[in-house]
Image (cartoon, rainbow, N blue to C red):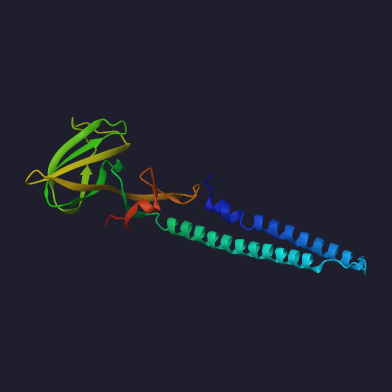
């Protein structure tokens, strides 16, 4: 079951307050019973004080456990609040996250890819959400990080509709040996979804976890 950080903060302490109320009431009742029994005990057969001592120790242990739980809840709430504050700070920023899918934004889609092992030639294939190939091209690739931009035109020259597209890259060096290629995508953070157990960023219509982000930078502004 997923818990919203907001609902966790709003309901914080309710369960622990109930626990404290119950243990306090039980402890008061226990003391009243103890005093009543002591007042009415048979002087010739006094009550066993060891049992009362053990019960007092047990009550004390329960109270300590509740205090420990309160402290843990406080730490959890502080962590949730920090996560929310940090996630909101991403709004308006450009992020790069691992993955090979992107969306057409302002007539184009962008991917970032990293080549390891040398330079050579790469084959770039764009597919739609149904897995159909809509565009393909080849070009030189260099070791390191580069950007592939697709102008949204299919191989037949028509414009592709808005949506999510995936990029597949295969590359080989001058000798025909395969090169390792890792693909990611970039986009501007438009909002934050707080309804999950952890905040999720909304980037170009996609949901991105904070752990998936590899690069954060200021959004480019026209000048």
Viewer-proximal residue, 175 or 132?
175
Give the residue at x 30% y 41%: 101
Horizontally, residue 85 falls left or right of residue 92, namely: right
Q: Is 188 situated left or right of 37 in this image?
A: left
Task: Write down the quadrant of residue 57 in the picture.
Answer: bottom right
Quadrant containing the C terminus in the rendered view: bottom left
Residue 143: x %, y % from top left: 15, 53
Q: Position of residue 7 (x, y in %)?
A: 57, 51
Horizontal side, residue 170 vs residue 39: left or right? left
Q: Residue at x 15, y 38 (%)?
A: 137
Which quadrant of the figure has residue 40? bottom right
Which residue of the protein is positioned furthest toward the left in this rendering?
175
Residue 70's image quarter?
bottom right
Is residue 111 toward the left or the right of residue 68 in the image?
left
Vertical position of residue 49 compared to residue 157: above or below: below
Q: Position of residue 152 (x, y in %)?
A: 24, 38
Nearest the viewer among 70 and 126 is: 70
Q: Please state the horizontal and vertical placement of residue 138, each as a whole percent of the image.
A: 13, 40
* Residue at x-position 67% and y-position 65%: 61
Q: Residue furthest front?
A: 44
Q: How many marks?
A: 0
Question: Quick one: quadrant of the N terminus?
Answer: top right
Q: Nearer the viewer, residue 144 or 22?
A: 22
């Amino acid at each position: 079951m997923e818990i919203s950080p907001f609902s966790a903060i709003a309901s914080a302490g309710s369960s622990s307050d109930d626990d404290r109320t119950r243990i306090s009431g039980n402890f008061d009742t226990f003391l009243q019973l103890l005093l009543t029994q002591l007042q009415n005990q048979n002087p010739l057969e006094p009550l066993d004080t060891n049992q009362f001592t053990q019960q007092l120790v047990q009550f004390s242990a329960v109270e300590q456990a509740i205090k420990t739980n309160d402290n843990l809840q406080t730490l959890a709430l502080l962590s949730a609040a920090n996560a929310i504050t940090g996630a909101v700070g991403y709004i308006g920023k450009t992020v790069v996250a691992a993955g090979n899918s992107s969306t057409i934004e302002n007539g184009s889609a962008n991917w970032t890819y990293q080549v390891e092992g040398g330079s050579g030639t790469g084959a770039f294939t764009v597919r739609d959400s149904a897995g159909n190939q809509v565009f393909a091209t080849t070009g030189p690739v260099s070791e390191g990080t580069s950007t592939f931009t697709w102008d949204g035109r299919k191989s037949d020259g028509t414009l592709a509709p808005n949506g999510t597209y995936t990029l597949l890259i295969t590359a080989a060096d001058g000798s025909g040996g395969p090169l390792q290629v890792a693909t990611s995508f970039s986009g501007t953070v438009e909002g934050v979804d707080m309804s999950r157990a952890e905040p999720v960023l909304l980037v170009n219509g996609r949901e991105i976890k904070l752990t998936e982000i590899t690069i954060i930078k200021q959004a480019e502004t026209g000048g």
